[in-house]
Amino acid sequence: MELKLSILDQTPIIKDGNASTALNNSLALAKIADTLGYHSILYSEHHGVEAYGSSSPEILATTVLANTKNIKVGTGGIMLRNYSAFKIAEWAKMLATFYPDRFILGLGKAPGGLKDAILALNGHKLPILNNINDKLEEIITYLKEQNYKDTELFAQPTHVLTLPEITWLGSGENSAKEAAKYGISYSMADFIVDGSNAEIQKMYQEAFNDKGYGSQPSFQVAISVSVAQNAEQARRNAFGMVYQFVESRKILAPGALKSSEEVETLIAKSEDKELFNSLLDKVVVATPDTIHSKLEEKALQYGTNDLVILSNTFREEDRIFTYESLI
């Protein structure tokens, strides 16, 4: 099976590290991924948390597009509750003009941070949550240069020759139905949900509206992966990433990426040990000799060859080793 592999880069900050180093690591990784032949690299949005260095995936994506040649680059994603649909459409059309066929507009419904950050992003008012689908529809209308609600407003630049691909990020059935309704790609975050949700791909395909934004369904799955020279080391390298998953599950702001030794000590005397182990079991742990067969298993499980790989490790060389081992 020929796999289409992409990278989800959260710009991880390690304990006692800083955002500047994390951002430079992201740029370096993108250049490596471009050389290796990855299909795309996507940047997440987080606000007011110690764990991740990028709050503006659109700016990071722009920087990476300017410093790479072939790889597609996108937002993974922009959290719609926090922004104007009109403004998103404007800068998305700008990037599609400068980088035709290379920019991916990934959009999502998640908060992107805890309460104080979300309030700050919304003028210190609670965001309106029931208009997120309306915002998605508005963005699509502006991108396609159609009339939105009987106004004559248009998003510059106009007459864009190649519109950006739109990907809807989610983790469940409702998000898949929304992506299908609007005729856009769907990216399912397997690494943060319980179970496999393997049936969602079929539901998305069957419900896909080929008269919507795009004419062909595109379903991808985001998985967490750790590769090392031996399986035990690969497993331990994932400890810091999984500990952050635990913090997120508990509605806590994830802390900076901890070493495997520190996580081991924390978990040994924690009530979260069972949760930690269950989330660790979801990580694809492998060696260079076994990783390809394990990725193919995931692809067959979900009925797609389109996989997005998340790998956050305490040592940057371990993260690079993982991504180099996949191609």
Image: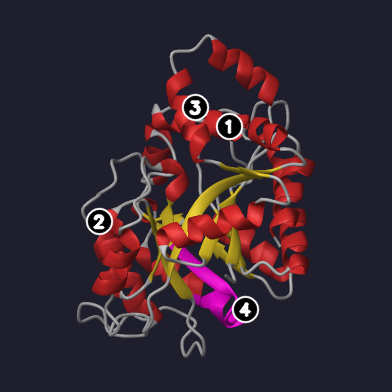
Q: Can residue 48 be seen? A: no
Whether residues under marks 3 and 2 lie with C-beta atoms below 8 angstroms apart, the answer is no
In the picture, measured across the screen, residue 236 lies left or right of residue 117, that is right
Comes first in the chain, label 2 or label 4: 4
Instruction: Name the residue that disc number 1 marks.
Output: 50
Comes first in the chain, label 3 or label 2: 2
Comes first in the chain, label 1 or label 2: 1
From mark 2 to mark 4, how far is it between C-alphas?
A: 31 Å
In which image quadrant can residue 148 be found? bottom left
Q: Secondary structure at mark 4?
A: loop
Whether residues under marks 4 and 1 lie with C-beta atoms below 8 angstroms apart, the answer is no
Marks 3, 1: nearer the viewer: 3
In the picture, measured across the screen, residue 216 lies left or right of residue 131, that is right
**Mark 3 crowdedness (10 Å alpha carbons): few <14, some 14-19, many ≥20:** some
Instruction: Name the residue that disc number 4 marks.
Output: 99
Instruction: Name the residue that disc number 3 marks.
Output: 277
From mark 3 to mark 1, how far is it between C-alphas?
A: 23 Å
Residue 31 vs residue 154, the one in the foreground: 31
Q: Secondary structure at mark 1?
A: loop
Marks 4, 3: nearer the viewer: 3
Q: Secondary structure at mark 3?
A: helix
Q: Secondary structure at mark 2?
A: helix
Comes first in the chain, label 4 or label 3: 4
Q: Which residue range is magenta in the image?
A: 93-106
